[in-house]
Image (tube, helix red, strand yellow):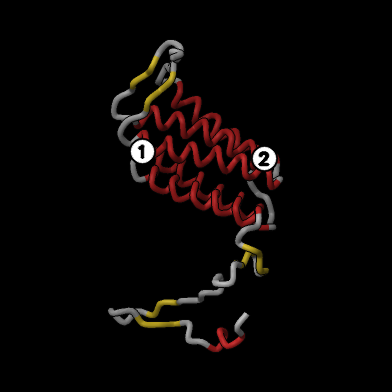
Amino acid sequence: MNLNFFKMKRFFKDASGFKIMRVHLGDWGETSVIGRRVKKTSEQVRVLGVLDELSAWIELCAGFCKGGDKNVLKKVRGDLYLISSCVAGGDCTVKNSDVDFLEKKSLEVDSKFKIKGFVVFTGEGCFFNIARTVCRRAEVELLGFSGSSVSFRYLNRLSTLLFSFAVKYSTTRRILLGSVRKR
């Protein structure tokens, strides 16, 4: 590592005069996780990256929500930060009651829609569907990394809730019935 780097100027002013920080400590393939340097290719950083991506999709989806759904996703975003903290080596504070909360919300949404086939999402529902697939990937990555069992259950229930929201927020609901035809 170039030790002269630490003597370099880290704060710059942008065109409007605001101070901005440029650290560039990741230029050597490492990043900081709770005060220690970790390779960016590590499993831990990969899991944290997928959780970060999921959080970004949740934030985008929250912009489409109405009423209490927005608050549900706001809570989810906070819970994802707690799971990330656990992966980073901090305390795991996601509880079984958080898992139960997601399950209850999912059942509330599902009670309004009866699905009997494969769903093709449209409109805003597509964003929830993408968030759901990222959530599934986060669940698999977390299983490989071995986080807390409550965190696994949480992500599993979250993907179910995101599916329910995808149905709810689709502008039209197309359900493909029957089996897939063989060619």
Residue 178 sits in quarter: top left
* Placement of 85 over or under 172, stated as above or below: below
Q: Residue furthest top?
A: 178
Q: How far across and how far down the image is residue 127, in percent?
A: 38, 39
SS class, disc 1:
loop
Asked whether 27 or 173 is in front, the reply is 27
> Which image quarter holds the N terminus?
bottom right
Q: Is residue 142 above or below residue 31?
A: above
Residue at image x 55%, y 54%?
49
**Measured Cα–Cα span from mark 2 to mark 1:** 28 Å
Residue lying at 33% horizontally and 36% vertically, measured from the top left: 124
Callout 2 environment at 10 Å: few (<14), some (14 to 19), or many (20+)?
A: some
| Residue at x 40% of width, y 31% of height | 166
Instruction: Check residue 150 in the rendering and tell me which mark sits there, or answer none.
Output: 2
Residue drawn 63% across and 36% down?
Answer: 153
Judging by the rendered image, the residue that carries numbered circle 1 is 67
Picture disc at residue 151: none
Crowding around mark 1 (Cα neighbors within 10 Å: few <14, some 14 to 19, many 20+) is few
Relative to 183, 173 lies left or right? left
